[in-house]
Amino acid sequence: MNNKLTRKDIEEMQAEIDHRKLVERPKLLEEVKETRAQGDLSENFEYHVAKRAKNQNESRIRFLERMIKTAKIIEDDAADNEAGINKKVTLYIPEDDVEETYVIVSTMRQDSLKGLISVESPLGKALLHHKEGDVVNVRVSADYSYQAVIRKVEGSEEAEEATLRNY
Protein backbone atom coordinates (compact mmCIF):
# COMPACT_ATOMS: atom_id res chain seq x y z
CA MET A 1 0.00 0.00 0.00
CA ASN A 2 1.29 3.43 -0.91
CA ASN A 3 1.14 6.10 1.74
CA LYS A 4 -0.87 9.15 0.87
CA LEU A 5 1.28 12.20 1.50
CA THR A 6 0.98 15.90 0.87
CA ARG A 7 3.66 17.83 -0.98
CA LYS A 8 4.60 19.41 2.35
CA ASP A 9 5.13 15.93 3.89
CA ILE A 10 7.47 15.04 1.05
CA GLU A 11 9.39 18.33 1.37
CA GLU A 12 9.90 17.71 5.10
CA MET A 13 11.00 14.14 4.47
CA GLN A 14 13.48 15.30 1.83
CA ALA A 15 14.84 17.92 4.24
CA GLU A 16 15.39 15.20 6.85
CA ILE A 17 17.15 13.01 4.26
CA ASP A 18 19.43 15.90 3.27
CA HIS A 19 20.25 16.65 6.92
CA ARG A 20 20.99 13.00 7.65
CA LYS A 21 23.22 12.67 4.57
CA LEU A 22 25.07 15.97 4.82
CA VAL A 23 25.33 16.48 8.60
CA GLU A 24 24.70 13.24 10.48
CA ARG A 25 26.41 10.77 8.13
CA PRO A 26 29.87 12.43 8.15
CA LYS A 27 29.71 12.89 11.93
CA LEU A 28 28.73 9.25 12.51
CA LEU A 29 31.37 7.93 10.08
CA GLU A 30 34.04 9.93 11.90
CA GLU A 31 32.85 8.54 15.23
CA VAL A 32 33.08 4.97 13.90
CA LYS A 33 36.58 5.66 12.59
CA GLU A 34 37.73 7.13 15.92
CA THR A 35 36.30 4.31 18.02
CA ARG A 36 37.74 1.67 15.66
CA ALA A 37 41.19 3.11 16.26
CA GLN A 38 40.87 2.48 20.03
CA GLY A 39 41.90 -1.16 19.79
CA ASP A 40 40.35 -4.61 20.04
CA LEU A 41 36.92 -4.39 18.34
CA SER A 42 35.49 -7.44 20.15
CA GLU A 43 35.75 -5.60 23.50
CA ASN A 44 35.20 -2.05 22.24
CA PHE A 45 31.70 -1.06 23.38
CA GLU A 46 31.99 2.48 21.99
CA TYR A 47 32.72 1.08 18.53
CA HIS A 48 29.57 -1.07 18.58
CA VAL A 49 27.45 1.88 19.76
CA ALA A 50 28.88 4.14 17.03
CA LYS A 51 28.34 1.45 14.40
CA ARG A 52 24.73 0.96 15.53
CA ALA A 53 24.05 4.72 15.38
CA LYS A 54 25.51 4.88 11.85
CA ASN A 55 23.36 1.93 10.74
CA GLN A 56 20.21 3.45 12.25
CA ASN A 57 20.87 6.68 10.35
CA GLU A 58 21.32 4.78 7.08
CA SER A 59 18.17 2.77 7.75
CA ARG A 60 16.15 5.94 8.34
CA ILE A 61 17.47 7.44 5.09
CA ARG A 62 16.43 4.31 3.14
CA PHE A 63 13.00 4.31 4.82
CA LEU A 64 12.33 7.96 3.95
CA GLU A 65 13.56 7.54 0.38
CA ARG A 66 11.28 4.52 -0.07
CA MET A 67 8.34 6.46 1.38
CA ILE A 68 8.89 9.31 -1.07
CA LYS A 69 9.38 6.95 -4.02
CA THR A 70 6.16 5.03 -3.38
CA ALA A 71 4.02 7.91 -2.09
CA LYS A 72 0.76 8.91 -3.65
CA ILE A 73 0.47 12.70 -3.60
CA ILE A 74 -2.81 14.02 -2.24
CA GLU A 75 -3.99 17.56 -2.60
CA ASP A 76 -6.15 19.45 -0.19
CA ASP A 77 -8.92 20.55 -2.48
CA ALA A 78 -11.43 21.21 0.31
CA ALA A 79 -12.97 24.67 0.53
CA ASP A 80 -12.22 26.83 3.58
CA ASN A 81 -15.43 25.79 5.33
CA GLU A 82 -15.08 22.08 4.47
CA ALA A 83 -13.28 19.31 6.33
CA GLY A 84 -10.03 18.43 4.58
CA ILE A 85 -6.33 17.72 5.03
CA ASN A 86 -4.77 19.58 7.98
CA LYS A 87 -8.11 20.94 9.18
CA LYS A 88 -9.33 20.69 12.74
CA VAL A 89 -12.85 19.28 12.95
CA THR A 90 -15.00 19.27 16.08
CA LEU A 91 -17.72 16.60 16.10
CA TYR A 92 -20.67 15.71 18.25
CA ILE A 93 -21.39 11.99 18.45
CA PRO A 94 -25.01 11.57 19.63
CA GLU A 95 -24.67 7.83 20.29
CA ASP A 96 -22.07 8.50 23.01
CA ASP A 97 -23.20 12.07 23.83
CA VAL A 98 -19.62 13.36 23.45
CA GLU A 99 -17.88 16.09 21.54
CA GLU A 100 -14.48 15.29 20.06
CA THR A 101 -11.92 17.25 18.06
CA TYR A 102 -9.65 15.76 15.41
CA VAL A 103 -7.18 16.94 12.81
CA ILE A 104 -7.36 15.16 9.45
CA VAL A 105 -3.83 14.33 8.31
CA SER A 106 -1.95 12.26 5.74
CA THR A 107 -1.28 8.60 6.47
CA MET A 108 2.28 9.35 7.64
CA ARG A 109 1.19 11.66 10.43
CA GLN A 110 -1.73 9.74 11.86
CA ASP A 111 -1.77 9.31 15.63
CA SER A 112 -5.25 8.70 16.97
CA LEU A 113 -4.09 9.07 20.57
CA LYS A 114 -3.18 12.68 19.78
CA GLY A 115 -6.33 13.34 17.76
CA LEU A 116 -4.62 13.07 14.37
CA ILE A 117 -6.73 10.89 12.08
CA SER A 118 -5.75 9.70 8.64
CA VAL A 119 -7.69 10.54 5.50
CA GLU A 120 -7.81 6.76 5.02
CA SER A 121 -9.50 6.03 8.37
CA PRO A 122 -13.27 5.45 8.40
CA LEU A 123 -13.81 8.75 10.22
CA GLY A 124 -11.40 10.66 7.98
CA LYS A 125 -13.10 9.36 4.82
CA ALA A 126 -16.54 10.22 6.19
CA LEU A 127 -15.59 13.78 7.13
CA LEU A 128 -13.86 14.86 3.91
CA HIS A 129 -15.61 17.70 2.06
CA HIS A 130 -18.42 18.03 4.62
CA LYS A 131 -19.30 21.36 6.27
CA GLU A 132 -20.37 22.57 9.69
CA GLY A 133 -23.82 21.25 10.54
CA ASP A 134 -23.57 18.22 8.25
CA VAL A 135 -24.44 14.83 9.69
CA VAL A 136 -22.03 12.17 8.46
CA ASN A 137 -22.35 8.42 8.61
CA VAL A 138 -19.10 6.76 9.71
CA ARG A 139 -18.99 3.19 8.45
CA VAL A 140 -16.55 1.26 10.62
CA SER A 141 -17.35 -2.21 9.29
CA ALA A 142 -20.07 -4.00 7.36
CA ASP A 143 -21.91 -4.52 10.65
CA TYR A 144 -21.35 -1.21 12.43
CA SER A 145 -21.64 2.47 11.64
CA TYR A 146 -22.47 5.58 13.62
CA GLN A 147 -23.43 9.17 12.96
CA ALA A 148 -21.54 12.32 13.83
CA VAL A 149 -22.52 15.97 13.53
CA ILE A 150 -19.83 18.37 12.39
CA ARG A 151 -19.90 21.28 14.82
CA LYS A 152 -16.88 23.24 13.68
CA VAL A 153 -14.22 23.23 10.94
CA GLU A 154 -11.14 25.34 11.63
CA GLY A 155 -8.55 26.57 9.17
CA SER A 156 -5.44 24.61 8.51
CA GLU A 157 -2.84 26.95 10.09
CA GLU A 158 -3.39 25.90 13.71
CA ALA A 159 -3.96 22.29 12.75
CA GLU A 160 -0.84 22.17 10.58
CA GLU A 161 1.29 23.43 13.45
CA ALA A 162 -0.07 20.62 15.64
CA THR A 163 0.74 17.98 13.03
CA LEU A 164 4.25 19.28 12.42
CA ARG A 165 5.05 18.78 16.09
CA ASN A 166 4.00 15.13 15.74
CA TYR A 167 5.91 14.29 12.57
Image (tube, rainbow, N blue to C red):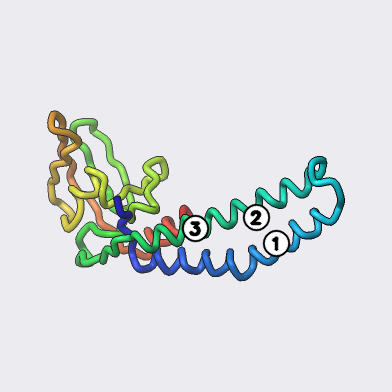
Q: Earlier in the sequence, mark 2 or mark 1?
A: 1
* Amino acid type indicated by mark 3: Arg
Question: Label 1 near label 2: C-beta < 8 Å?
Answer: yes
Q: Could you say where residue 62 lies in the image, as x and y percent from the top left? A: 49, 58
For residue 54, which numbered disc appears in the image?
A: 2
Report helix, strand or loop for mark 3: helix
Comparing 17 with 134, the one in front is: 17
Which residue was labeled with disc 3? 62
Q: Could you say where residue 157 lies in the image, as x and y percent from the top left? A: 37, 65
Q: Could you say where residue 35 lies in the image, as x and y percent from the top left? A: 80, 54
Q: Could you say where residue 166 lies in the image, as x and y percent from the top left? A: 46, 53
* Amino acid type indicated by mark 2: Lys
For residue 29, which numbered disc appears in the image?
A: 1
Q: Residues within 10 Å of mark 3 (few under 14, many from 20)?
A: few
Residue 80 seen in the current view:
yes
Residue 86 seen in the current view:
no
Up the image or down, 10 lies above or below 92; here it is: below
Q: Would residue 123 be found to the left or right of residue 102 on screen?
A: left
Extreme residue toward the top, this view: 143
Residue at (34% x, 59% y) in the render: 70
Q: Would residue 19 be found to the left or right of residue 164 on screen?
A: right
Report helix, strand or loop for mark 1: helix
Up the image or down, 1 lies above or below 19; here it is: above
Residue at (37% x, 63% y) in the render: 69
Q: Residues within 10 Å of mark 2 (few under 14, many from 20)?
A: many
Q: Marks 2/3: CA distance?
A: 13 Å
Residue at (65% x, 55% y) in the render: 54
Residue at (40% x, 65% y) in the render: 10
